[in-house]
Amino acid sequence: MSEYNPFAAPSDFGDITTADKPFREYGGIRRLPYFGYSFLVNIVTQGMQALAAANDMVPLAYAAIPVSVAGALYLTYQRCKNIGMNPWWCLGIIVPLVNIFVGLRCTAYPEGYEDHKTLDGPAKIIIGIFVAAIVLTILAVVGVIFFAASGR
């Protein structure tokens, strides 16, 4: 019979060789600053476009596009680091349909989600609001198509 008993409790000296994951510093920005700074980037972009339209300044309107894209990329980069995702996912924010996936993760997921895979209360609420908005949008589009086809 072997000396090793697989059913015995581990000793205090560490019979088990699995090492705990070391503490990880994520960096980046958290959920609320991400949401607030994203809102600020949109306000600046809309302000530039309104100023350009009011004063007939076409170059300023074109300058608002890179400001918006650069702001979104930077904020998403920082938030992806905070979640624990690969920061290259920030490029997904400019790809249609992928931006829904990346934006939802950046808006909802808590710090270090990629390591612990646990959603907290605010994350569940934010995801519920996203899903409800998508479902209501689809229902509205189907309703408009249905009523347009019925001739009303």
Image (cartoon, rainbow, N blue to C red):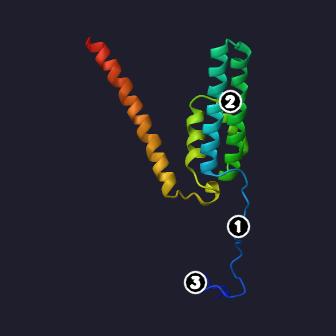
Element carrying mark 1: loop
For label 3, the residue is 7
Label 3 Cα neighbours within 10 Å, binned few <14 / some 14-19 / many ≥20: few
Query: Residue drawn 47% across and 41% down?
Result: 130
Q: Give x and y (percent) for residue 17.
A: 72, 75
**Mark 2 sits on what residue?**
68
Mark before the other along the chain sequence, 3 or 1: 3
Q: Secondary structure at mark 3?
A: loop
Residue at x-position 55% and y-position 59%: 118
Tag nearer the camera, 1 or 2:
2
The residue under label 1 is 21
Q: Amino acid at mark 2?
A: Ser
Q: CA distance from mark 3 to mark 1?
A: 25 Å
* SS at badge 2: helix
Residue 84 showing in the rendered view? no
User: Which quadrant would the C terminus be assigned to in this image?
Assistant: top left
Report the mark closest to the observer, 3 or 1: 1
The dot on residue 100 is none
Placement of 104 over or under 23, stated as above or below = above
